[in-house]
Amino acid sequence: MTRIKTLLMASAALSLPAAAAAQAPENTIVTALSADITTFDIAQVSERGNSNIMRHIFATLETTQPDGSIAPDLAESLEITEDGTGYIYTLHEGLTCHDGEALMAEDVAYTFNRAADPDNGFTGNVPGFLFSGMQFEGAEALDDRRVQVNIRTPNPIARGLIAEVMVHCMDAYEAMSIDEAGQNPVGSGRYQMVEWDRGSQVVLERVVDESEAPVERLVFRIIPESSTRTAELLAGNVDLVTNVPPDQLDVIDANPNSDVYIAQGLRRIYVGFNLSDEFAAMPGGDAIQDPMVRRALQYAVDVPSICTQLLNFECERATGLVNPPHNHPDLEPYPFDPETAEAMLDEAGWERGEDGTRFSIRFQAGRDRYLNDVNVVQAITQMLQDVGVDVDLQILDWASTYVPLIRERNAGPLYFLGTGGNIWSEFIDMNDLNSVEAGTNYTHWDDPRWFDGWDVIRDPSASPEEIEETRLEMLRVFYEDGPWLHLYSQPDFYAMSSRLNFTPRQDERVYLWTATLE
Amino acid sequence: MWTFLLRRLLQSVIVLIGVTLISFVALQIGGDPTYLFVSENASTEEIERARALLGFDRPLHIQYLSYVWDVMRLDFGTSLTFRQPAMDVVLAALPASIELTLFSLILAIVISIPLGIVSALYRGKPVDGGIMTFAMIGQSIPNFWMGIMMIMFFGLYLSWFPISGHVPFLRPLFQGDFARAFGNLPQTLHYLIMPAIAVGSYTLARNARLVRSSMLEVLQQDYVRTARSKGISETRVIVHHALRNAWLPVVTMIGLEFGFVLGGVVVVETVFSYPGVGRLVFNAINQRDIPVVQAAVIVIALIFILLNLIVDLIYARLDPRVKL
């Protein structure tokens, strides 16, 4: 149905003369989002579009920059304790929250501890991902302006994770129930919420000087249907659209009042090899236990063609799980070479049988989660079948069926997945596989050449050179014998009105205080 | 009358138990939703804690009985995604759905009844053929396609109507903010026109056909012939004698249609970014927000029950032979 609608939309837009474009309100950026906003509680939010809006309302101690560097925000400085487990932030003077309450160190400590308190039952990204990733122990105010965040063990990615935690004041939140806090944000950021018409729109107004946020008013409209978002942009009612489907890019680009921007995203898309003992006893699961088979299959998939034909962008195939610029500089992407793939499979002992099949294997994927995912997995299936692998493709409902399989590390033996990445640390993308038993090691891969490397990385006495050498060796092992069939980092498609000056980031964060209007 | 109402009340309780049980079982078939509410890095202990917190660690029959007990105390649970009372979330979306439903049905009724009557009176003539062709088209066109075409032509090209969105009227009205409600009204109607046509076109077409066939049947009855032979004007014959009897199947259909449109126009609500109950339930099902789905099912079931009751009462009023 989506394809039919897109076709209709494209043909109608192209066949009609250009409509007189309306103009979105002055000094206001109108952004169209696909998903509903569910909360404004920093401890409960987990969806990217939702947290992007909230980041305008709430400030953070530090902030990650588009180039991967970390810059001060509420904090003017940071010192790390000698044992590497205490992060002491000194706040700027004169900070306040939107209700006028002074923002002190005890407010920051309260924010962190409230989100971590199991009695509150929060299930958002802060307690669920950031705190578990940094092994958060607690936060304490050392004086009015200094707050210490404690973690269990030294952790190379803790600083970046702390920089993601949005901060609010204490008094306002102590006076509210959890339900109320989710609906009435009292923030510390550049904008404050003035309207939330649930299911329709959120309106923010600037509370800082124009130099810190040039645009006075931000409107985030919820428009679930992609063709309607595009129509609103073409009509001039919307300035920015995120998650534009690739098949609508040409329509938008052809309009004189709108432009397309393609950001090379950081979400890593791959086919995983589930190497669990259970799958090793299954058809195909036994074959992929052999690193040579896994390597052979890398040659069987034509990733650049998938990118150009199905995703509408030119991509370079990934060489591992780390995004540039922290990827291994000397590794070349596997070329598409089915003959080499076939020769390697022969050599590994999986020759074609009389029916032309080498082995059968199940390939599972969720539906409608990633860009054109169903078409991509169908293309991969065909390419693997071309080298003699009989693939049983199962496309499953994302929420009800696929997510439980993935979380139980029970998808596969082949499974299709994307995982968010970042560039503010050379270790953040590697962190998915920080231990054999990590919840995100969906592959059950246990190669000691990778996992022992973490001991060196976490060793406070290791030199930077030693750490880097270990890291690169780990990436080489992952490239050659790892549990991923390397694909690509997913692009992010944005559409903008011609009056908007805004450069989207690679990490899906949309921070509009960096934008201006003509 | 009172016996009838009491009987209907008892039937309603059975219906409510049935729909909650069916929806509960249907949602449980989808598996344990706990994984959607914990992070990818969650440990087994964290997953177990979340499962207990969400109440999914108990046996299914205990979960259901506990739910029924809570509902009897008017506690419909807390939304897993909004973290607010589930019924509040549903009731917040209900006014927008009522606006769309009422407007689209009024539009459909006001147009379909004259069309059906004219078509019946000119049976076999070009007017009849034209109206029935129009009705056939109205029933055949998928409402999402009609919605997108209207967006492209009337929204984008002619700029007559807003492409998407909603300006609330009933919500401020229910909140007692009459100035805002009536201040919004022109904008509310402006935003409603395209979605209401997309939603109502099917009802309009079906009702036009229904009125036509019903009228044709009634016009051949003896009492109509008798009325004409008494020299009563044709208008009076049609309005007072024929139409009153032709109404019965139409009233039934409109009653059912109200409930259907209220909760079942997900595609149109999505195309026009309309914040109604249908879209809310669709998202809640995707997110496995079981309390919201259950609360919405109860609300929609109650509305259906109420509508059926109203239809029966109207039936009795229209047709004296019907005894309650």
Image (cartoon, grey):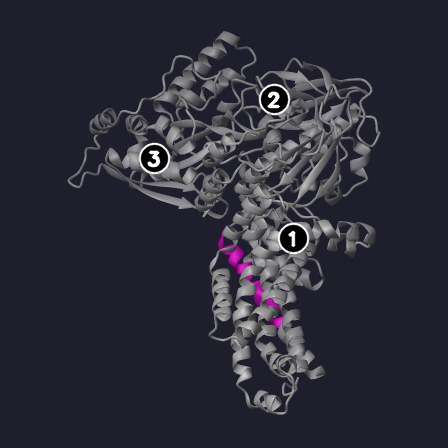
Q: Mark 3 points at which residue?
A: A380
B65 within the magenta span: no
Which subunit holds the residue at mark 3?
A
Q: Which residue position is annotated with label 1? A: B192
Magenta extent: B13-31
Q: Is residue A257 or residue A93 the one in the foreground?
A: A257
Query: Which is more toward the observer, A58 or A110?
Result: A58
Q: Can residue A430 be seen in this snapshot? A: yes
Residue A228 is labelled as: none
Numbered label attached to residue A160: 2
Q: Which amino acid, mark 3? A: Ile
Density class for disc 2 (Cα within 10 Å; few <14, some 14-19, many ≥20) is many
Q: Distance between the residues labelled 3 and 2?
A: 35 Å
Q: In this view, does B28 lie to the left or right of B67?
A: left
Tell me: residue A2, above or below residue B15.
above
| Residue A150 in the image: above or below residue A202 | above
**Amino acid type assigned to the residue bearing label 2 in the image:** Gly
